[in-house]
């Protein structure tokens, strides 16, 4: 056992710290008395204890220490709104539960809609869709405004987009170059623009004068365009731009070129005239005024009597523009093209070659004059001479042709009389649909078939008989127009008419539109007849009623007799007796309308009439004779039961209520099942992710702690 | 440890902030003593205590048995203090203290001189010993509480404090001799 001396360090420390047991303290005191060394140590220990106490007293934390620690903790680890805590709190709130339920229902609804593919948009979606376009268009509208302010207001709306860029530029700089740019894009718009161009030319002679007089310098169109880009009215602006567009060709031709230039000018004009002959005469007059002539003229008569043709006029080139101007008076200008062909180079080439050939001819002639003896040489020279002369003639011809071409401008005028498309005639096509009810379908069918003759052609006839013995027939026929009314009347008489429809169509021949004097012809009438058995006819009036009587079977028999008396037929009847001792007889009758009233009167003799309901089918289009139209009457004759039926009373109500409750419960269970089926697949991965995240953070934390 | 304490610890482990704040109130001074014992610097010690609590709160779920919570928190504080100390090691504590002493050399009373010597002797002890000494002298805790706070086994503290004081005694022999 270790002595105190061995453990003196521990014991001394414990002694100064008052941690010795009584026994130990006594033992220490005994030992200290004995051991001087330990006594010294004990003294030192006490001194050191005092010193330590002193140095630590200064270091004790102040009073506010705990509070500081708490605040630091709250700052550094704020009560985190953890997702789980948040969710739990959220789940507790009633509003959240309701919202969740609503969302779930909506989700189910949407899912169902998605599955069934039913179309039903929720109103606010539609509204937002409607609301968005104007927002998107704002920028575009602003851009169009810029275009307008830039003087380019003559652009139609659709083209506005294309000129947004140009419009923007002209707004900032107001430079005619930009306007020109816009005009160039405008000219790409095609035929609509060119038609507008002619209207503009007619409307503003000033611009045409400009064009015909002194040739336009490059500055002039620019000036016009500059005017266009400032605030001149839209129409004159468009006139100016369009004039520029077609301007160059006439002005170029009017330019006085070198004297020896060979220019071939030609023009093509499409005109719509009131009268072809008059127009040709007028053109002839204009041609001679312009010192020209009508070269060729052709015409073509259309089916509707209108004329169409082409006139080729030769006029002196310098008079061409005047001539074209006059042509506008002849009729409506539809189209015009003017072209110039410069054949100067070709002409000069041919001329040079001609001169060469003529020189060659001279030399060959000289060779001949020398009178060579060799006959072969002579023949060769003769042959060559012939060839050269042929060439010369050909070239002279070409030159002459070019001369005449250049001498006269060719104007090809296509003429068409107004209302070219008016139809030559009309055809009235009639189609009739007739539905008949007949007592004997087959007989009527054969009767109609017997009508066939050259003027009445049967195109199709079918007779159907099904398993239940129902017979129906369909017949299609073509009837000559003059016979049609008589035949249709004859067919109608074969049975009761259910439906008759007559459709007339006016078909234009050789054109379209209206014509005042075109003839109208009647085409063959097509008649389609369907015949069905009378039994199948829907009743005009349906009546149901109940008769309470003591002896049901007797009354039923009486009922039959009554019906037969009134020319009616029993269509169906049944008799039943239920466990409560009640008897029912159901009888359904059909009588002609004319006998309906008297039958109803005699019925009241049978017993008390109850629950009378009358249903009448009004057919405004059908021309039926009402007196013979069928009226159906369903009569139930019944006797009073004695026992309270088991579908009324307290117990039955209770049973029904319970059953409905159980059904509702089952339905809600079903819904919950559906909801779970939707949610469960999501819960599993979410749980897995949370679990994994916790694992990772735990592992990281443990590593950090280590 | 009574059952009320254990309940408090358990509640704190389960995320009860109020319980944990109660623990902060009761344990911040002992923790300060531990950290101060290691670091010999009030500011740093305070920081260590704060950090230790925050860290303990964040990873409280790792404590399986509520009884071990105080020991665990003090372990965290000790580790934290060691970290700071290690970072600071480039300038050893002894030298710092000596510099401090040298700075105030001019007007130094005999008491101050003695305290400086005691401090430097304390600085030579292992960290755990220093913590134990600080708990004893700063908090006047009895051995059992210190053992519990530091997570030591029963009776281990006696040896530790014995050795600590003996070691210091040997270093301070001349100064102590002068005091007698």
Image (tube, coloured by chain):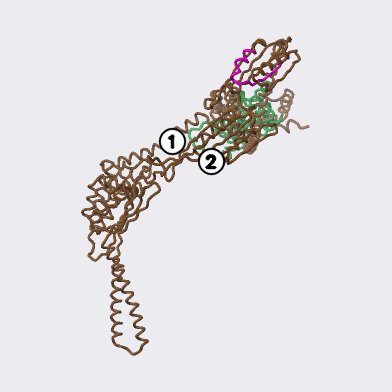
Name of the residue lying farthest toward the bottom: A373
- Residue B74 sits in quarter: top right
* Front-lying residue, A33 or A89: A89
* Front-lying residue, A468 or A686: A468
Q: Which residues are magenta?
A: A584-602
Mark 1 or 2, nearer chain start:
1
Q: Is residue B53 visible?
A: no
* Residue linked to disc 1: A133
Q: What is the number of the mark on residue A455?
A: 2
Q: Position of residue A405 (x, y in %)?
A: 29, 63
Q: In the image, B35: left or right of A580?
A: left
Q: Position of residue A642 (x, y in %)?
A: 73, 9
Q: Position of residue A610 (x, y in %)?
A: 64, 12
Front: mark 1 or 2: 2
Q: CA distance from mark 1 to mark 2?
A: 64 Å
Count residues near mark 1 (Cα–Cα under 10 Å), then give few for <14, some for 14-19, many for 20+. Answer: few
Q: Is residue A551 visible?
A: yes
Colour of chain B in the rendered structure image: green
Q: Residue at x 73, y 17 (%)?
A: A576
Judging from the image, mark 2 belongs to the subunit labelled: A
């Amino acid at each position: 056992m270790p002595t105190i001396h061995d453990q003196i360090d521990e014991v001394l420390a414990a002694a100064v710290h008052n941690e010795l047991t009584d026994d130990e303290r006594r033992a220490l005191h005994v030992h200290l008395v004995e051991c001087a060394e330990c006594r010294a140590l004990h003294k030192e220990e006490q001194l050191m204890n005092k010193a330590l106490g002193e140095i630590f007293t200064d270091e004790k934390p102040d009073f506010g220490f705990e509070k500081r620690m708490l605040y630091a903790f709250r700052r550094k680890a704020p009560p985190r709104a953890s997702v789980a805590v948040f969710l739990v709190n959220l789940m507790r709130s009633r509003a959240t539960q309701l919202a969740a339920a609503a969302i779930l229902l909506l989700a189910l609804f949407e899912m169902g809609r998605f599955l069934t593919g039913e179309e039903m948009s929720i109103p606010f979606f539609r509204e937002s869709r409607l609301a968005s376009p104007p927002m998107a268009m704002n920028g575009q509208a602003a851009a169009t405004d810029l275009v307008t302010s830039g003087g380019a207001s003559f652009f139609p709306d659709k083209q506005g987009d294309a000129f947004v860029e140009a419009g923007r530029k002209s707004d900032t700089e107001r430079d005619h170059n930009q306007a020109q740019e816009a005009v160039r894009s405008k000219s790409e718009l095609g035929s609509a623009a060119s038609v507008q161009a002619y209207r503009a030319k007619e409307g503003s002679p000033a611009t045409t004068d400009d064009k015909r007089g002194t040739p336009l310098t490059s500055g002039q169109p620019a000036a016009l365009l500059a005017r266009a880009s400032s605030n001149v009215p839209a129409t004159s602006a468009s006139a100016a731009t369009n004039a520029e567009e077609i301007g160059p060709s006439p002005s170029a031709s009017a330019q006085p070129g070198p004297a020896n230039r060979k220019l071939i000018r030609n023009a093509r004009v499409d005109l719509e005239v009131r009268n072809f002959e008059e127009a040709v005469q007028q053109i002839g007059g204009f041609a001679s005024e312009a010192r020209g002539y009508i070269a060729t003229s052709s015409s073509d008569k259309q089916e509707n009597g209108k004329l169409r043709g082409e006139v080729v006029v030769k006029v002196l080139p310098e008079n061409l523009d005047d001539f074209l101007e006059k042509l506008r008076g002849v009729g409506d200008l539809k189209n015009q093209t003017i072209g110039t062909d410069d054949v100067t180079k070709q002409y000069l080439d041919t001329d040079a070659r001609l001169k060469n050939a003529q020189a060659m001819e001279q030399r060959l002639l000289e060779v001949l004059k020398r009178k060579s003896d060799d006959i072969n040489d002579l023949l060769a020279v003769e042959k060559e001479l012939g060839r050269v002369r042929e060439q010369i003639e050909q070239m002279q011809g070409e030159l002459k042709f070019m001369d005449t071409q250049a001498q006269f401008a060719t104007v090809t005028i296509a003429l068409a009389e107004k209302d070219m498309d008016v139809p030559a005639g009309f055809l009235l096509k009639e189609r009739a649909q007739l539905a008949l009810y007949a007592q004997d379908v087959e007989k009527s069918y054969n009767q109609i078939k017997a009508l066939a003759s050259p003027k009445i052609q049967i195109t199709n006839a079918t007779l159907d008989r099904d398993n239940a013995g129902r017979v129906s027939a369909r017949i299609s026929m073509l009837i000559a127009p003059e016979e049609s009314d008589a035949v249709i009347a004859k067919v109608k008489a074969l049975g009761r008419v259910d439906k008759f429809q007559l459709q007339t169509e006016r078909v234009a021949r050789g054109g379209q539109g209206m014509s005042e004097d075109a003839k109208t012809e009647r085409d063959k009438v097509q008649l389609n007849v369907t015949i069905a058995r009378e039994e199948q006819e829907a009743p005009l009036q349906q009546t149901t009623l109940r008769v309470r009587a003591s002896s049901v079977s007797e009354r039923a028999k009486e009922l039959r007799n009554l019906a037969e008396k009134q020319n009616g037929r029993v269509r169906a009847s049944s008799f039943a007796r239920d466990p409560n001792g009640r008897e029912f007889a159901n009888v359904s009758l059909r009588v002609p309308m004319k006998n309906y009233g008297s039958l109803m009167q005699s019925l009241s003799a049978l017993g008390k009439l109850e629950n009378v309901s009358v249903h009448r089918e009004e057919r405004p289009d059908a021309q039926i004779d009402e007196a013979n139209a069928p009226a159906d009457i369903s009569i139930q004759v019944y006797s009073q039961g004695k026992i309270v039926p088991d579908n009324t009373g307290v117990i039955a109500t209770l049973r029904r209520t319970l059953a409905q409750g159980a059904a509702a419960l089952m339905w809600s269970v079903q819904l919950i099942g559906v909801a779970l089926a939707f949610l469960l697949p999501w819960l599993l991965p979410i749980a897995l992710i949370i679990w994994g995240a916790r694992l990772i953070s735990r592992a990281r934390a443990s590593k950090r702690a280590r | 440890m009574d059952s009320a304490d254990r309940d408090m610890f358990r509640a704190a482990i389960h995320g009860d902030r109020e319980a944990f704040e109660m623990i902060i109130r009761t344990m911040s001074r002992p923790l300060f003593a531990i950290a101060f014992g290691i670091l010999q610097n009030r500011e740093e010690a305070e920081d260590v205590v704060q950090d230790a609590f925050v860290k303990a709160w964040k990873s409280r779920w790792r404590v399986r048995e509520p009884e071990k919570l105080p020991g665990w928190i003090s372990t965290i504080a000790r580790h934290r203090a060691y970290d700071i100390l290690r970072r600071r090691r480039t300038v050893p504590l002894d030298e710092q203290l000596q510099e401090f002493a040298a700075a105030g050399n001019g007007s130094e009373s005999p008491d101050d001189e003695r305290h400086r010597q005691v401090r430097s002797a304390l600085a030579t002890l292992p960290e755990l010993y220093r913590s134990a000494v600080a708990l004893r002298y700063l908090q006047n805790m009895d051995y059992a509480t210190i053992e519990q706070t530091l997570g030591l086994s029963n009776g281990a503290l006696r040896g530790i404090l014995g050795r600590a004081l003996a070691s210091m005694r040997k270093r301070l022999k001349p100064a102590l001799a002068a005091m007698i």
